[in-house]
Amino acid sequence: MMKKLKCNPDTGFSLLEVLVAILIVTFFTTVAMQMMVISAAFKSKAKQYTTATTLIEADLENVRNLADQYRFPTLASPTPSPSATSLVLSSGNGLNAGDKIQFDGFPQIYTIQTPNPIPSNTPTIIISPAMTVSPRPAIGNTVVSKTSCSAKLANADIGLGNDLLNSIQSTVNSSPTVSISSITYKPVVGNPFTLTNTRNKIWLMRNDSYNFTGSVEPYDVLRIDYVVVTDNNNTPSNNVIAKLSSEVIPYASLQCIR
C-alpha cells in the first residue's frame, strides 16, 4: 500500500528555483527599464519635432504675410495735370531706375529717371516722357512696373521674386550659417529657441533662393528652404530635426498688367 507524500511546511525553495526566479525578475526589469529609456527618447524627439514644425510654420506664415504686403506702389498725392514729370508714391516696391511703368487702367508707358535706390517710404520719382493724361483716381492708382513683371533671364535680378527676397532679409541674421546638402542656411531672427521645460536649444535656419541657372522661370517666385537643427555650444549643428521647402509669390505679381 503506497504512502501519501506529505508537504513539509519547513521546506523552502531550492537554490535552482531561486536562481530561476532571480533571472526572470532581472530579465523583465531590464526590459521594462529599456522601454522607459526608449519611451523617454521618443518623447524627447517628438517634442523637438513638434517645436520645429511649429517654428517653421510660424516663420513661413510671416514670410507669406510680407509677400502679401509686397505690392506695387500707389499714387500718394494728387497727380498734376498732363505734362507732369514728378510723382509722389506710397512706396518703392518693385520699382527700379530705368523701369517701364504704367498706371492701372491706362495704356500709356513711362520710364523712371530717378536714380537707384528708390526710397521705400513715399518716394518722389521722375518720369519721362511727360504725362499725357492724369490717371484716375488721382490718389491710390497703382503704378505697375512692366519691367519687373516681364523679367527674363537677361535681367532676372530685377524680377519680383528678387525684390521680395531683398525685402525679407531683415527677418534673418547673416551668421552663424550652416551648410547642408550644398545649401547655406541663415538663422531666423530670434535664434536659438529653447524647448519648453528644458535647457535644450534648437535653431531655425532659412535659405531664400532666387536661382537663375539655365532658363528657370517664372521670376516672380521665391523659393524658401527651412531646416531646424540641434544646438552645439550655442551654434547650429548639422543634425537636422525637420526640414521644409515652399514657394512664395508676392502680391505685386497679381497686379501685373499682362
Image (cartoon, grey):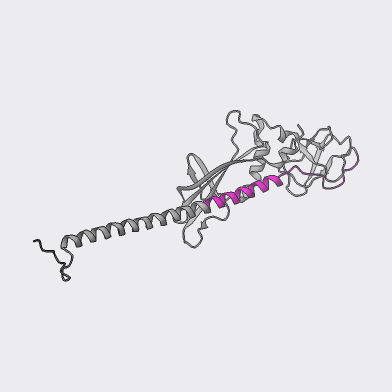
Principal secondary structure, stretch drawn in magenta: helix
Based on the picture, tell me whether residue 66 belongs to the magenta stretch.
yes
Give the quadrant of residue 32: bottom left
- Specify the segment rendered in magenta: 52-81
Give the quadrant of residue 212: top right
Q: Residue furthest front?
A: 1
Q: Is residue 160 above or below residue 190?
A: above
Residue shown at 52%/45% (left/top)? 243
Residue shown at 28%/57% (left/top)? 27
Q: Pick the residue in front: 227 or 209.
A: 227
Which quarter of the rendering shows the C terminus? top right
Give the quadrant of residue 13: bottom left
Q: Residue 26's x, y, as percent?
A: 27, 59
Q: Residue furthest left?
A: 1
- Asked if residue 153 lies left or right of residue 16, the reply is right
Q: Residue 96's x, y, as percent?
A: 72, 39
- Asked if residue 174 lies left or right of residue 5, the reply is right
Q: Residue 208's x, y, as percent?
A: 59, 42
- Asked if residue 222 lies left or right of residue 203, the reply is right
Q: Pick the residue in front: 241 or 44.
A: 44
Q: Residue 253's x, y, as percent?
A: 71, 38
Residue shown at 41%/55% (left/top)? 39
Based on the picture, tell me whether residue 245 belongs to the magenta stretch.
no
